[in-house]
Image (cartoon, grey):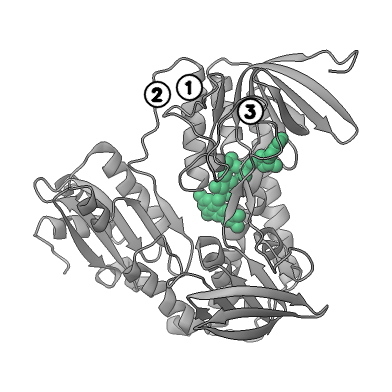
Amino acid sequence: MVVGDFAIELDTVVIGSGPGGYVAAIRAAELGQTVAIIEREFIGGVCLNVGCIPSKALISAGHHYQEALDSSTFGVTAENVKLDFEKTQEWKQNGVVNKLTSGVKFLLKKHKVEIIEGEAFFVDEQTLRVIHPDSAQTYSFNNAIVATGSRPIEIPGFKFGGRVLDSTGGLSLKEVPKKFVIIGGGVIGAELGAAYANLGSEVTIIEGTPQILPTYEKDMVKIVEDDFKQKGVKIITSAMAREAVDNGDSVSVRYEVDGKEETIEADYVMVTVGRRPNTNDMGLEQAGVEMNERGLIQVDNQGRTNIPNIYAIGDVVPGAALAHKASYEAKIAAEAISGKKVAVDYKAMPAVAFTDPELASVGMTIKEAKEAGLEAKAFKFPFSGNGRALSLAKTEGFMRLVTTVEDNVIIGAQIAGVGASDMVSELALAIESGMNAEDIALTIHPHPSLGEIVMDASELALGMPIHI
Ligand SMILES: Cc1cc2nc3c(=O)[nH]c(=O)nc-3n(C[C@H](O)[C@H](O)[C@H](O)COP(=O)(O)OP(=O)(O)OC[C@H]3O[C@@H](n4cnc5c(N)ncnc54)[C@H](O)[C@@H]3O)c2cc1C
């Protein structure tokens, strides 16, 4: 500490303002803690600024464009459909992202959370140093919540810059690439691949493993693959990306498949092979906080690290890197600091891929249930058996329920189809509450709605389906 730099005392300090950090700050304030939040870049973190929200905005723009180009199924035709991508980007930024991030700032202020702009470094387990562009300040704290999130992984041969993009670059392109190569067919790569294919790009996805979207089951992914095929998206699996050469007005991407070297030319290449936690270079070692070999912070079931007054949540801790997981852990950590007897329970954690169609899963797959030693069964109800899906002309896909054999308790669900991202919540509630298929089958669902598929699938699990 330099002479004259007196430490400012804080009660609860949250580092990072993503869906983990800002939710933790608000909940802690609601519980009566005096809270400060430190952010080095944008309020709202990755999700609001360069993740979930802008990607969903581009996905939605792609759908509107495709519908305008071809809605002939409904007898609707249009001429001279044009895409003004500059306007799309302007809407995404000002109409969506900025509105949401100013909403978060408003909420933080409303809850009297002090916002400190700057980069935080731990000095020890009770002290932080916050570096601003032209000054620095020391803070002492009683409790800290680390919510510093993650950043894209850079792979050898693909140095980010110019025509070699990370997901942030992929979201802020000024033009729709004529040819777009995506390295990594996980959720982020597949979502943006679908979005740009809908916006008019010729997309190639290069994936290292034998299947794109490897976290979803084969029969679900097959439906997305069929859609990619229809869009003309080329998927190359079991392929290793080797190098990108930026030619100034194009990029050459070299990869290896079946022992052969291939090269494709594109306007841009985007690398979405994974993300790494922001836990290095912030003094966590000085505070004595333990991390695993991947740089993830080890926490107990309340989000507490090995240092009792330091908590960690979101992408910096093990588990799926999802925004709603970060926000969930945030509330548990804030409540634990307030002395509440809370603990995380990930039994009903949904995951969604906003592809065409959407994929969603919650709870266990049948394979996981069997591996866990449960006597379980699985039933699949097709979207083609649902009137609303038919009226939307979106009948591809299915909902699968996984239930116990003995008493039909819902333990898992997987959905591939339109609206899956919204439908999965009912099933998360069912799993969270320990409901069985009869509870759902006896719940009146509005007709005609996609939600009826949940009821139909439950009737199927009970052996008394009406619509199949
Ligand atoms: C393209 C893309 C699409 C995605 N889509 C989805 C989706 O649809 N659904 C979903 O659930 N998830 C999605 N995700 C993942 C989601 O964005 C993350 O899981 C989520 O943002 C993690 O939240 P977090 O609070 O842990 O951290 P982050 O959102 O990463 O926020 C961390 C914040 O901490 C700040 N910070 C870091 N270090 C310091 C420091 N030393 N001092 C001060 N501040 C610091 C950073 O600037 C950042 O603002 C997507 C991600 C990407 C990249």
Please report the residue visible at 52 percent of the width from the left and 72 percent of the height from the top: 207
- Separation of residues labelled 1 and 3 (CA atoms): 14 Å
Question: Do labels 1 and 3 touch, CB within 8 Å?
Answer: no
348 relative to 169, above or below? above
| Residue behind mark 2 | 342
The tag on residue 14 is: 3
SS at badge 3: strand
Percent across and percent down for residue 21 are 60, 34
Does any atom of ligand 1 lie closer than 8 Å to the CB of label 2? no
Q: Of the residues shown, which amino acid type is indicated by label 3?
A: Val
Q: Nearer the viewer, residue 244 or 397?
A: 244
SS at badge 2: loop
| Residue behind mark 1 | 335
Q: Is residue 407 left or right of residue 343?
A: left
Q: Residues within 10 Å of mark 3 (few under 14, many from 20)?
A: many
Question: Do labels 2 and 1 touch, CB within 8 Å?
Answer: yes
Q: Of the residues shown, which amino acid type is indicated by label 2?
A: Val
Percent across and percent down for residue 192 are 58, 67
Q: Earlier in the sequence, mark 2 or mark 3?
A: 3
Q: Is residue 256 left or right of residue 351?
A: right
Please report the residue visible at 67 percent of the width from the left and 40 percent of the height from the top: 280
Classify the position of the C terminus by image quarter.
Answer: bottom left
Percent across and percent down for residue 206 are 55, 75
397 relative to 166, above or below? below
Q: Earlier in the sequence, mark 2 or mark 1?
A: 1
Q: Of the residues shown, which amino acid type is indicated by label 1?
A: Glu
Please report the residue visible at 63 percent of the width from the left and 76 percent of the height from the top: 181
Q: Is residue 146 left or right of residue 225?
A: right
256 relative to 64, above or below? below
Percent across and percent down for residue 163 are 75, 71
